[in-house]
Amino acid sequence: MSMTMAEKILARAAGLKETEAGTIVMANIDVAMTHDLTGPLSVNSFQKIGVEKVWDPEKIVVLFDHQVPADSLEAAQNHIFMREFVEKQEINNFYDVNEGVCHQVLPEKGHVIPGEVIVGTDSHTCTHGALGAFATGIGSTDMAMVFATGKLWFKVPETIKFDIEGELGKHVYSKDVILDIIGQIGADGATYQACEFGGETTRNMSISERMALCNMAIEMGGKTGMVEVDEKTRNYLKGRTNKSYEVFQTDEDAESLSTMYVDVSDLEPQVACPHNVDNVKPVGEVEGTPIDQVFLGSCTNGRLEDLRVAAKIMKGKQVSSKVRMLVIPASREIYRQALDEGLMNIFVDSGALVCNPCCGPCLGGHVGLLGPGEVSLSTSNRNFKGRQGSPEAEVYLSSAAVAAASAIRGEIADPR
Ligand SMILES: CC(C)[C@H](C(=O)O)[C@@H](O)C(=O)O
Ligand code: SF4
């Protein structure tokens, strides 16, 4: 039977020869991730079940990233609570306040393996599909069941394949591609679909760029984002994991597969305007919009390549006196590499603030919140009302290049 990558992975995880979209399967979970914000809810629910020990401590990853270091008494208490859980359950895969954002740290540390089923109590867990896994966000009570049994049921999703073709122009990146797609099909355009990104353009993208695509699958309602494993994937995994893995590919004649053709050859830098991710416009239409803050970071665009692009634009220039710019590398590894490459000097010399790897102001829970009436340009993935602080603030989303150019200009600017 012809199947999609998502169907094949879920069938494998459920111990079945085959399955098809719409079927309910009970899958064995390969990796279960929780963090400082949703972890306490998951652990509370787990404790209510009354099971003493988690099913397999080696398959659980606990990481602190949303409020690190603790910015409130509540956050500090959450951290204490989770550290106690980790110790009691003998969970070795524990990353405290110093590693960075879960969706960057998990792949870096070799927890993301092609063909595996990864669940996390965070909606952007779909990012990990960039390495050919089936990865999805789940609720905290679902996670409690995973902790107890190692299993979770799924309705097998249909797949929408984005066949992305064309060469990206100067200062046009995967962020612009995904914003364009979301703008076209809307915030519910791929509801409960496995969003598979393919085509020549995707194949030419780095793993970081593919992660940015998959990261935002949830912003169009997707169950997960995925990219087929290739040489780049294998190279990325080298040195990060010794685990052998199975590679699954979508059969072109799979029944539950639909395809959307996306031509990006004339694509301009894109910006998502307040207050919805699908309110997307070419940068030219919003050029000149005054901004108060620029946030370069997050699990969407806080990677080394993003920092490089921004540093190149900002080198020798000053951040506008009207703007606060926050640079937050997505992980310690990225931070370290950026230091080695001299990128941090460029940011600091330009007047930007460099913070420790964390989610930062992305969801308004930590450093750099916006006040009423303020406008932010952010490389993250959501711009909902109140997302980065005050409900009376406005958030625009863009690539790192648009963010850097705008920080210098003091208003939304075209990096070209
Ligand atoms: C805190 C967490 C539940 C949340 C998510 O699930 O995505 C956050 O990471 C976000 O980006 O909004
Ligand atoms: S960086 Fe933002 S989107 Fe990503 S996990 Fe953190 S809060 Fe969520």
Image (tube, helix red, strand yellow):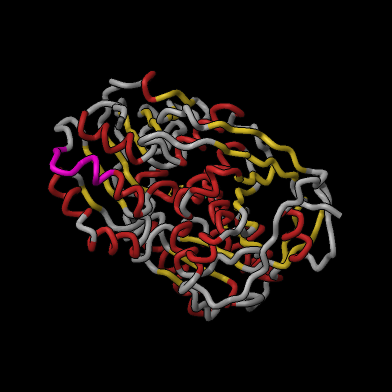
Give the residue displayed 61% in from the left and 51% down from the top.
226
Give the residue displayed 24% in from the left and 40% down from the top.
313
Quadrant position of residue 373 = top left
Is 314 within the magenta?
A: yes
Q: Nearer the viewer, residue 76 or 366?
A: 366
Q: Nearer the viewer, residue 64 or 306?
A: 306
x then y, percent, for residue 156: 77, 51
Horizontal side of residue 13 vs 300, given as left or right: right
Q: Nearer the viewer, residue 262 or 345?
A: 262
Residue 370 appearing in the image: yes
Give the residue displayed 34% in from the left and 66% down from the top.
98
Horizontal side of residue 84 vs 255, given as left or right: left
Horizontal side of residue 370 vs 54, given as left or right: left
x then y, percent, for residue 412: 30, 27
x then y, percent, for residue 85: 51, 73
Which residues make up the magenta segment?
310-318
x then y, percent, for residue 70: 33, 59
Which image quadrant: the C terminus? Answer: top left
